[in-house]
Image (cartoon, grey):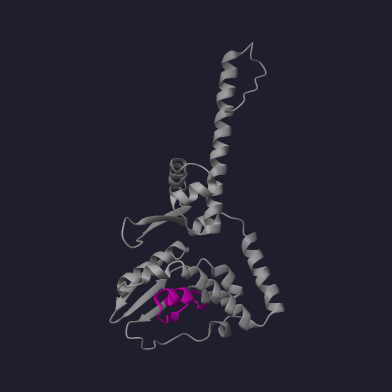
Amino acid sequence: MATCYTLYHWKHPAGSIIYCLLSGKMLADNQAKNTRDRILQTLLLREHCTINELADLVQINPISVRHHISRLEAEGLITSDETHHGVGRPRRFYFLTEKGREHFPTRYIRLTMGLLEQLKESVPPIFIKGLFTQMARDMASNYRSEMDGLPMDQRVELVKQFLTREGFNVEVEKLGDSYHIRESNCPYFQVGQTHPEVCSLDQTLISTLLNIPAQKVQCLLLGDAHCTYIIPGDLSPAPTIPDLEKQTP
């Protein structure tokens, strides 16, 4: 409950009441904004959460989380997707949109690039590649069990949902026996311009989740309209783009 301090309580009781109401509203607005900021920060760190997970992490009740989520969705800062977990009702996960990620100061991008530059001065390039590969495998490990026993079209759909939660805009098209996964944006684009090794993240994610090599045939960093991956149904090799690191200055 807000505490109201009035200067002219005895002379101007009506003014005192208005002051109290305005002070209480401003405090409530600030508290609501702080809660929404905490939700955004949690999604930045955790990448995707259910309502109940957010309630536990932000330490408010699920009903309040839903209220704040509705506001953040209306502002275009977060979105959601449903994921099926075997038998039972699908689970809805919430995650930041590209606009939501841009809500945070660019110092995080500068920090990431600075750390990579320091690493490159200290360790061989193969270590950097291995670092991103392991990161992608760790990200995929929580979802591999959902792929077990599913036909390829459902597995590809789950990959699309996962990449969407990671901040990619994804389209999937089946052409013949192959699936074409197209990403029209990249949440790592700014970092990738200086450190193209980051491009291995989504390729490794797709390959690991499907347990099939994903062939990259287009890349945003090379000026293409999409990053495009081909998943060959017959496992025959698709044409690949040249080594990105050799082409990126």
Q: Position of residue 156 (x, y in %)?
A: 35, 72
Is-magenta flag for residue 160? no
**Could you say where residue 211 lies in the image, as x and y percent from the top left?**
41, 78
Residue 175's x, y, as percent? 30, 79
Residue 154: name its quadrant: bottom left
Q: Would you place residue 116 above or below residue 102 in this image?
A: below
Residue closest to the eye, 127 or 219 = 127
Give the residue at x 55% y 71%.
135
Please tell me which residue lies in front, 112 or 74.
112
- Say if 55 sits above or below 196 in the image: above
Indicate left or right for 41 with 48 as reference: right
- Magenta span has 214? yes
Q: State the residue at coordinates (55%, 25%).
A: 21
- Tell me if 241 is positioned left or right of 20 in this view: left
Quarter holding residue 67: top left
- Region rendered in magenta: 203-228
- Quick check: can you spot residue 144? yes
Q: Quadrant of the C terminus?
A: bottom right
Q: Position of residue 29 (x, y in %)?
A: 54, 36
Q: Is residue 238 above or below residue 165?
A: below
Q: Residue furthest left?
A: 176
Q: Residue at x 57, y 43 (%)?
A: 34
